[in-house]
Image (cartoon, rainbow, N blue to C red):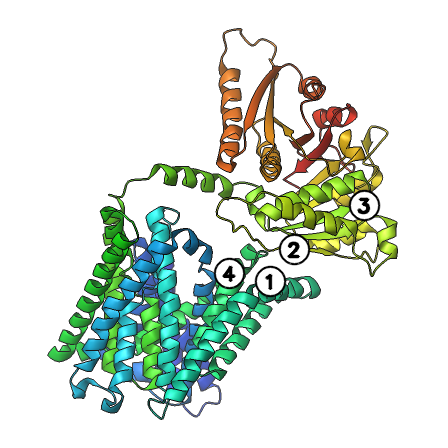
Amino acid sequence: MIGRKRFFISVALMVLTVGSAFAADPGHTESGEVLFIVQVVLLLISGRLLGEAMQRIGQPAVTGQLIAGVLLGPSVFGAIWPDLQRMIFPSGGEQTSTIEVVSRFGILMLLLLTGMETDLGVVKPIRRAAFTVSVTGIVLPFAGGFILGQFMPLAMLPDPGRRLITSLFLGTALSISSVKIVAVVVRDMGFMRRLVGQVIIASAIVDDTIGWIIMAITFGLARPGGFDLATVGQSVIGTALFLIASFSLGPRATFILIRWANDKFVMELPVISAILVLMGVMALITYAIGVNTFLGAFVAGILVGQSPILTKHIQEHLRGLIVALFMPIFFGVAGLHTDLGALASFSMLLLSLGMILIASLGKFSGALVGGALGGLTVRESLALACGMNARGSTEVIVATLGVTAGVLNQALFTAIVVMAVVTTMAMPPMLRLALSHVPLRPDEKQRLEREATEARGFVANLERVLMAVDDGPSGRLASRLVGLIAGSRRIVTTVLPVDEAAEAEPGSAHGAEALVKGAGEQAEKPEGRPEKTPPVDVETVRPKAPVEEMVPEQARKGYDLLVVGVEPAREEGRFSARVGQVALSFDGPFAIVVARGPHHEDPDRTERDILAPVTGTDFSRHGAEVAIALARAVNATVTALYVESKSVGQSRGDTTGTRNEAAILREIEQLGEQQGVTVNAIVRRGAAEIEVPRQLLSGQHDLVVMGVSRRPGDTLFFGDVPDAVLDSTGPSVVLVSSQG
């Protein structure tokens, strides 16, 4: 680590040397470009090093990035070497404008990311506590900040004639919690899914949303011309209409945009380009209706975060760009504008301390009162109050916008930044202490166990399914089963017809699409899902080539599972050539559905019991997950069958096998309990390729779901046990190869 630090410091010194040389030569044609690169590199290096240092002591990285800017600004670097500091970071001119433009665009990118990390679904189950905490937590510090602005001496105001606007900015800056800082700290502490953690996050989300609406209106008031009732009315009505349209039509439109960009373009990262365009368009819309662009960027982020597909893809690429580039630059530039020398004045120091006191006491008391009104315990309310006191990035953005609007001066900007840094750095240790005394509720423990299981599970992480099916019994059964899971878990589905009849009628809808939608509407919804859920999103892609050639083309669009339902599924004791070609052409998890018995005559027949053979392997557990998800959708039961093969030489008193089978079956039973599905465990002794088919002869099961692992080779083969099941007489079979 020391070596890496020395490397970064050496690079920084070299950059300073180059930057000073070019800054000293204003006539050089490339000096502006090189100086801009020097500024960016210095901000990135210092922001990375200090951000890393802050994280290592339990503080958010954004604090280090802000301090890095302060060190590079007039307070430290400017005091040590003022001429070089002014050459590299001039206070005016074209060079300053360039880095400022990048910084302001960084604001939009940060708000986009903040919106993406805003999970509105978290708010609904605990909306009472979240809203009471948020409202009381905003009202008290907002009132304190507003009163402070109203009684502030005229000498401290940038424009005495706009005292009202300055007071509104101060009230907003002191009242909003930074959802980004709060989320980072709560996540790092492992309390993201705890009840108190969810209330903290949900309240911060409501805080941010209300705060940015207030800021949008306040910024409209701050426009030249002073207070104008018509302008205010336009801002308020325009904001209301924008929010209504965004949250009613926006989610569907955003999903369509993301899917269209992903599926139609062949160039790299088209979804990221589409999201940036969406952010820009929504930012321009909010500007056109009389409020600032930041509200559009924030709402765009919320809509993108609600997209049911490609969430990991979007997070990985877009978040990396924002965190690695725009965050260090924005917070670094904010730090450059912070002149700690202003605090040398007793009046400014007193003002900064007053802001910290008003912000902390207002937020603390408001959260305590709101927690009590929301039905939380005293310990939970205390932890909530500690968590809501972090300001950080949000206040810096508000202060920057205030300076841009001309209602905050450099001294007030510095005081707000100091308040944001102090409250942010005080939050983690206080929250850790408070959370350590909050006991775990029984229902909370059960929910956390279920969520932890789902996080590492298979079905819970499915976002998009591709179906290659025909109109035969296996295709119809596959369509219905996919619809059951898609309907209960909001999984986007694409149908790729295999039968020639579908290929010949490009204008008609394939029957599989109707089957998926119908099954999705009938599926039981998990707890917490609204009774009226959107219909299952299904589209049919007409093949323009043989289906085994179409599957790889579709696979690049980002599908998590391929489901194959084709007749005939088996020929001469092995999978048919078409089933094998389709399955092997997909680079990822796939499932093969084979309709037999009653399902062969009636694929719509509802299952009463599903058999899930288990072995203790990951792919076996994934198969059991699929069985439990299907059982949950149709209110069926699951029978978990474990076959123990007693090895030669194993002693009669050896209980190792007994312990193993108990643990394996208990895991499946717990999966069922978490989903509200009854799992009946059965243990048999002998060879699995004999005992599993024998269990099917009991006639108790309507479907077999097996997790399997594909064996190496040019043909599709999963081993002797799946082959024995497929060659036996019995119910329909679903083979799930979760490892591709």
Q: Amino acid at mark 1?
A: Phe
- The picture quadrant where one finds residue 537 is bottom right
SS class, disc 1 = helix
Q: Earlier in the sequence, mark 3 or mark 1?
A: 1
Question: Dot 1: few (<14), some (14–19), or many (≥20) neighbours within 10 Å?
Answer: some
Question: Residue 113: where, in percent of width, then height?
Answer: 46, 65
Alpha carbons under labels 4 and 1: distance apart:
10 Å
Q: Amino acid at mark 4?
A: Gly
* Whether label 2 touches label 1, CB < 8 Å: yes
SS class, disc 2 = loop
Name the mark on residue 305. Answer: 4
- The picture quadrant where one finds residue 56 is bottom left
Question: Residue 265: where, in percent of width, then height?
Answer: 69, 66
Alpha carbons under labels 4 and 2: distance apart:
18 Å
Q: Earlier in the sequence, mark 4 or mark 3?
A: 4
Q: Amino acid at mark 3?
A: Asp
